[in-house]
Image: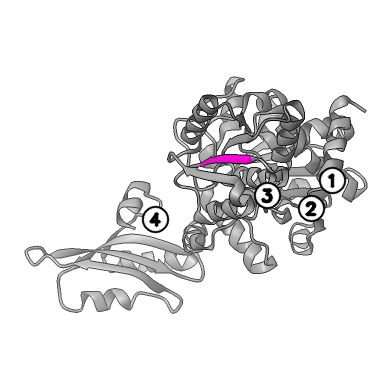
Amino acid sequence: MSDFADTALAVTARLRSLFPATPLQKNAYLSQKYGAEIWLKREDLSPVRSYKIRGAFNAMRKALEADPGQSMFVAASAGNHAQGVAFNCAHFGVTGVIFMPVTTPRQKVDKTRAFGGNSVEIRLVGDYFDETLRVAQAFCAERGAHFLAPFDDPHVIEGQSSVAVEMLQELGTPPDLVILPVGGGGLASGVKRYFDEMAPGVPLWLVEPAGGASLTAALAVGAPETLPRVDSFVDGAAVAQIGRKTFDILRRIPPDQVLLAPEDRICVTILEMLNVEGIVLEPAGALSLDVLPQLAERIRGKRVVCVTSGGNFDFERLPEVKERAQRYAGLKKYFILRLPQRPGALRDFLEMLGPDDDIARFEYLKKSARNFGSVLIGIETSRAENFDTLFTRLAAADFTYRDITSDQILSEFLI
């Protein structure tokens, strides 16, 4: 057994003083759906509802062993790392100053406060994580505090490897396939290092959000690459640049084993797991499940472990998640209708709607000097095919319309 595997086992044993191993649960619904034996490693059931508590614990423990007099720790996080740090600050009796992006969901900010209590101070800075990170590191250098990196740190990587240790211990024998999310790379690199030693034949499939594909970008050029723009919806995994230390471990992952999950499709997965299984997952926590349809043929008849990495979901975001899921599934569309300025024109349009078509948005601006008026319409329906029928009727009646559902600029401005 290598030094890393020994360390991973030791870290896992030490974690038992903080919390029991998170469950590895066979999911009957997904297993039946995909004709496979699908197990969920429920990191969403840790004390802070994510795996981040592991790396924070190990990094803080190592720092205190090296310098028992260290009393202040600083972290930058979009939420889950912050909660892990806060929990451990209270556990070790030290002070933490935690920097979080202004865009962090309120639920994560409140939970961080609750876990840390009087041990932590929270500062909301920056719109994106990378900006928050720069401010936190500058503060840390100025105050002589110890910075707890969210992912690009060997001690954090050791801590996250405990997920792999528990996975093999709970399963008994290695699975056929493991699917896990990747953001900065701490979890993926920790799992990979342990599996390389203890279960080298098991392929790892990594999933990152389409709007934050930092590993894909790094693999393309052979080094960490800063993305010009990041979609912060998957706030637990959307980073502009993967860690340098983590990429050194992940650089040999075959590029075709790194999958991208569109943000709107992730919303479909979140709702499916909530409505069918009663499992609450945040966007990053749903990544490993979101790609199951893409891997359906590959996983059939096999034993698969999916890491559900976090469950810190703010239910104030549920309307947005539902909206994005409906639009991705083709069950909701927005379009601009050019409506003739004549009596009965609106009634003619309404009669074209099917029995399952429901108007969710209607804004009409009548301009008396023109023969036509523009109407912004949002329609929900039960089957995507219903829109084909509606649009066929509109065309036959010479109604002019423009579908703006996928037009990002118009959608953001009008909807």
Q: Is residue 98 magenta?
A: yes
**Residue type, numbered disc 1:** Glu
Q: Give me the disc on residue 405.
A: 4
Q: Which one is closest to the eye, mark 4 or mark 3?
A: 3
Q: Could you say whether the residue bearing mark 3 is in a helix, strand or loop?
A: loop
Look at the image and tell me in which quarter the C terminus lies: bottom left
**Residue type, numbered disc 3:** Ser
Tell me the distance, in whole angstroms, between the alpha carbons under discs 4 and 3.
34 Å
Q: Is residue 334 above or below residue 115?
A: below
Mark closer to the chain start, 4 or 3: 3
Majority secondary structure of magenta residues: strand
Query: In the current view of this chain or complex, which residue is farthest to the top?
Result: 222
Tell me the distance, in whole angstroms, between the alpha carbons under discs 4 and 1.
44 Å
> In the rendered image, is residue 86 in sight?
yes
Tell me the distance, in whole angstroms, between the alpha carbons under discs 3 and 2.
10 Å
**Residue type, numbered disc 2:** Thr
Look at the image and tell me in which quarter the N terminus lies: top right
Dot 4 crowding, Cα within 10 Å, few <14, some 14–19, many 20+: some
Q: Quadrant of residue 121?
A: top right
In the image, taking residue 197 as reference, residue 94 lies left or right, namely: left
User: Circles 1 and 2: CB distance less than 8 Å?
Assistant: yes
Write down the region rendered in magenta: 95-99
Q: Could you say whether the residue bearing mark 4 is in a helix, strand or loop?
A: loop
Residue underneath mark 3: 50
Mark closer to the chain start, 4 or 1: 1
Q: Could you say whether the residue bearing mark 2 is in a helix, strand or loop?
A: loop
Mark closer to the chain start, 1 or 2: 2
Mark closer to the chain start, 3 or 2: 2
Q: Give me the disc on residue 166.
A: 1
Q: Is residue 95 above or below residue 338?
A: above
User: Circles 4 and 3: CB distance less than 8 Å?
Assistant: no
Residue underneath mark 2: 22
